[in-house]
Amino acid sequence: MSENENLKFDSKCVHAGIGDYEHGPVIPPIYQTSTFKFESTQQGAALFKGEKEGYIYTRMSNPTVEAMEKAVASLEGGYRALGCGSGMAAISTTLLTLLNAGDHIVFSEAVYGPTATLIVNVLKRFNIESTPVDSTNLDNIKNAMKPNTKVVYIETPGNPTLAITDLSGAAEIAHSNGAVLVVDNTFMSPALQRPFEHGADVVVHSMTKFLNGHADVVAGIIVVKTQEDYKKFRSVLNQLGGVIDPFNAFLVHRGLKTLDIRMKKLSENAMKVAKFLESHPQVKWVRYPGLESHPQYEIAQKQQSAPGGMISFELKGGFAAGEAVMNSVKLCTLAVSLGGVETLIQHPASMTHLSMGQKAREEAGITEGLVRLSVGIENADDLIADLEQALEKASTV
Ligand code: LCS
C-alpha cells in the first residue's frame, strides 16, 4: 500500500488496496467465509487480545473487506476506513460512536431524508438534542453551537437541494467549540472533493452511489483520520454489527477502479444537461454546482474539482409538469438512488425525502415541484434529447 500513496489520484483508483495474495491473483480474492481457523488455542487467544495480527471472524475483519477499506481510505486521504452494510449503517454507527446522552448535534437541514429522521427522531430517544441549520451560511452553524455540541454534521452538496457548505469554515467553527466535523461526501466522492483536506474529522459515504457506481450494491463506509479514532469506531461497529459483506466489498473495490474516469465523464454530461435545462423556457430554476447561478458557486469552485452528476430543477408548471417529465422519460430511469452509470430521475418530496415531513422539507428548500436527476455516463446528446421530448409532453399538462 505505502508505495501507492505517492501515486496520482487516477492511478490510486486502479491500484489502492491491492495486495499480494496466494497464487498471485491480480484482483483480491473474495474470502467468502464467516470465520477463520486458528493454528492453536494460544494463537486464537493472542488474536483476540490483539497481540497478533490476523483474521478471526468476518464481522470483525475480512481480507476482501480490508482491501476495499484501504483503497477508500487512501482515496480520501484518511488513516483507515470501516466498511458498513449501507450508508445509513455508516452514519448511525458514526453518530453512536461520537455522541453520548446529553450531547447536542448541529446538522445541515438539507440532508438525505433518513439521515435527518435518524438525527431528529432516533437520537432524541437517547437524549441527544439536535439543531438543523441552513449551513450555507456559516453564521447559522456558529449561532447553533452550544457548550454540549459534540458533532457538526454536514452533507455538501446536500441531497437534493445541492446546497453547498464551506467545509473549512465549518471545520473551524466545530473545532473552536471542541466539536468534530463529520462530512457526508456521497454526492462528490473523493474524486471531486476530499473533506479531510478542508479540516473534516470523519468522512462518511453511501457507497451505494458513486464509489461503487453500478447500482448493484447497498453499502457504506466511515473514513477516519487517526489510529485512535479507528480503534474507537471499529469497536462500536463490531458491537452494532452493521458491516459490509465480502462480496459487496469486492464489487465496490472493482467499481473504484473507474471512479475518476466516471466522475469526470458524468460531470461533463451533467454540465451540458444543466445548461440545457437552464436555457429551456419551461424550466423555473436549475440548481447545479457548475452553473454560475448556483448561490454557492464560489465555494464549489474552492472545494470541488468538478461539479458532479447531481442536478435539481423545477418546472414552471410545478409538480404536475415535473410528474409528466418523470413519467415520459425513456432513456432516463424513474428510480431513487443515484451515482450509477445510468441516469436516474426521481421526486424527493414523495420519495427520498418523504420521511422528513413537509415542514422540515419546506425549511430545507425541498419544494413539491423539485425534480432530481443523477446524470450517468451515457452520451449527453442522448440524455438531452430524452429530456427534450419529455419536456415537450409536459408542456401540455
Ligand atoms: N447519504 C446520502 C447523501 C445519500 O444520498 C444516501 C442515500 C445515504 C447517505 C444513505 O445511504 P444508503 O443507506 O442508502 O446506502 N440516498 C438515496 C437517495 O437519494 N435515493 O435513494 C437512496
Image (cartoon, grey):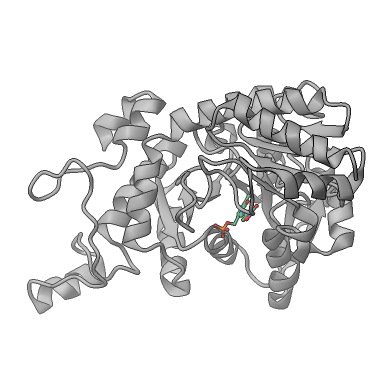
Residue 277 as seen in the image, left or right of residue 236: right
> From the viewer's perspective, is residue 125 above or below residue 296?
below
Q: Nearer the viewer, residue 299 or 161?
A: 161
Q: Nearer the viewer, residue 376 or 392?
A: 392
**Residue 158 in picture, x, y percent from top left:** 71, 44
Dividing the picture into quarters, in which one does residue 24 lie? top left
Residue 36 as seen in the image, left or right of residue 231: left
Q: Nearer the viewer, residue 37 or 260?
A: 260
**Residue 141 in picture, x, y percent from top left:** 79, 45
Q: Quadrant of the C terminus?
A: top right
Q: Is residue 308 visible?
A: yes
**Residue 360 in picture, x, y percent from top left:** 85, 58
Residue plotted at (48% across, 73% down): 240
Q: Is residue 137 visible?
A: no
Q: Nearer the viewer, residue 281 or 16?
A: 281
Total labels drawn: 0
Dividing the picture into quarters, in which one does residue 308 lie? top right
Q: Quadrant of ligand 1?
A: bottom right
Residue 274 as seen in the image, left or right of residue 258: right
**Residue 68 in picture, x, y percent from top left:** 34, 48
> From the viewer's perspective, is residue 271 above or below residue 370?
above
Residue 29 as seen in the image, left or right of residue 137: left
Dividing the picture into quarters, in which one does residue 275 lie? top right
Residue plotted at (68% across, 39% down): 157
Q: Quadrant of the N terminus?
A: top left
> From the viewer's perspective, is residue 244 above or below residue 378?
below
